[in-house]
Image: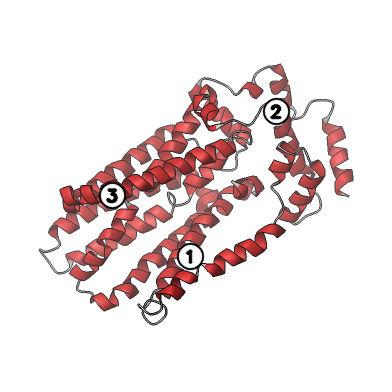
Amino acid sequence: MYLTEISPQEIRGSLGQVTAIFICVGVLTGQLLGLPELLGKESTWPYLFGAIVVPASIQLVSLPFLPESPRYLLFDKHDEAGAVKAFQTFLGKADVSRELREGLAESRMQRNVHRLSVLELLRAPFLRWQVITVVVTMACYQLCGLNAIWFYTNSIFGKAGIPQEKTPYVTLSTGGIETLAAVFSGLVIERLGRRPLLIGGFGLMALFFGALTITLVLQDHAPWIPYLSITCILAAIASFCSGPGGIPFILTGELFQQSQRPAAFILAGTVNWLSNFAVGLLFPFIQRSLDAYCFLVFATICMAGALYFYFVLPETKNRTHAEISQEFAKRNKASPPEEKGDSAVAEKANGGLEPDSSATLDNGVKNRVV
């Protein structure tokens, strides 16, 4: 949520995708440190566990020096001077009049709107499809079957003839593929958009899960088939990290305006972890009942998610929160309370500003910045 609020509109997706990149870097770092030559031995595992202290300490030391979110300062604290300083710190420039003007315009549109609770968010008719989209996105994020891959990885590597003592080194390929795919997504997300990466990611995962099912069923028929299984695993991991691995969190921040965003993130996090819990609870039974065919279940979920995003999700790239809200208003058949009435139309026509205040605000902002 913090990243969403501090990001300039034109790099909002790329900056949000940095989270996924560093998660993948963390996985790869853990795999490296877990090698037998480093900390992957019985005598050294406490040190591997204690390595968490390093990133946690860096975060604790650095966070107090980060400015508060400019949007939070404008919307919740009504602190324009603080917002100007925060914008200047984040953007690295003195003239932030455009950013402040856009923030004030959005703040004015929501000046009579209170912060929504989770229950109010669920009940609001003008947010119905945004809420459904976040629920579907977070559910697919956890239920897409990526966690199931790790269950099969060692056995597939063994079937391919890779000695058990060599498995940790081969497993590094999964972390490397994750990182490369996440970096690729961060580089292209502002060009391709969120929608194609989500649809393509889930669609390709469904395809590779189908191929993985075939190779798992036939893996004893020829010595080269297990290598196809490894290829399918790496391809599915790359498909996940190229879009579905990071975009769900970006969308949660983009689909909701400031007064709705905290409740939206609570809802998204709840669905995320409940889905994670469901996978951990149910996967052993699914695997025991279906064996290799369990990936067809995940392929179905991935395909259903891809179809949902194709028919429902609008592109949010380089669009304001108000524009995204208006796009969903057509499907919800209801507009947010702050957007109804002639005053909202007048504000929109003047870039979110009232006719007689535009010039005054522009000059005032420039004077404050100077």
Image quadrant of residue 66? Answer: bottom right
In the image, is residue 244 above or below residue 187? above
In the image, is residue 366 above or below residue 230? above
Label 2 crowd bin: few (<14), some (14–19), many (20+), radius 10 Å: some
Could you say which is closer to the camera, residue 284 or residue 113? Answer: 284
Label 3 crowd bin: few (<14), some (14–19), many (20+), radius 10 Å: some
In the picture as drawn, the residue positioned furthest to the top comes out as 341
Residue in the image at 43% along x and 44% along y: 272
Query: Looking at the picture, which amino acid does disc 2 mark?
Result: Met
Identify the residue under disc 3: 207
Residue 25: mark in rendering = 1
Task: Please tell me whether mark 1 sits on a helix, a strand or a loop.
Answer: helix
Label 1 crowd bin: few (<14), some (14–19), many (20+), radius 10 Å: some
Position of 169 compared to 226: left or right?
Answer: right
3D distance between C-alphas at marks 1 and 3? 26 Å
Indicate which disc, 1 or 3, sits on the residue closer to the N terminus.
Answer: 1
Residue 169: mark in rendering = none
Image quadrant of residue 302? Answer: top left
The answer to whether residue 199 of the structure is visible from this angle is no
The image position of residue 120, as x and y in percent, is 54, 27
Task: Please tell me whether mark 3 sits on a helix, a strand or a loop.
Answer: helix
Identify the residue under disc 2: 109
Indicate which disc, 3 or 2, sits on the residue closer to the N terminus.
Answer: 2
Could you say which is closer to the camera, residue 340 or residue 69? Answer: 69
In the image, is residue 17 above or below residue 48? above
| Colour convention of the picture | secondary structure
Between circles 3 and 2, the one closer to the viewer is 2
3D distance between C-alphas at marks 1 and 2? 40 Å
Query: Looking at the picture, which amino acid does disc 3 mark?
Result: Leu
**How many marks on residues?**
3
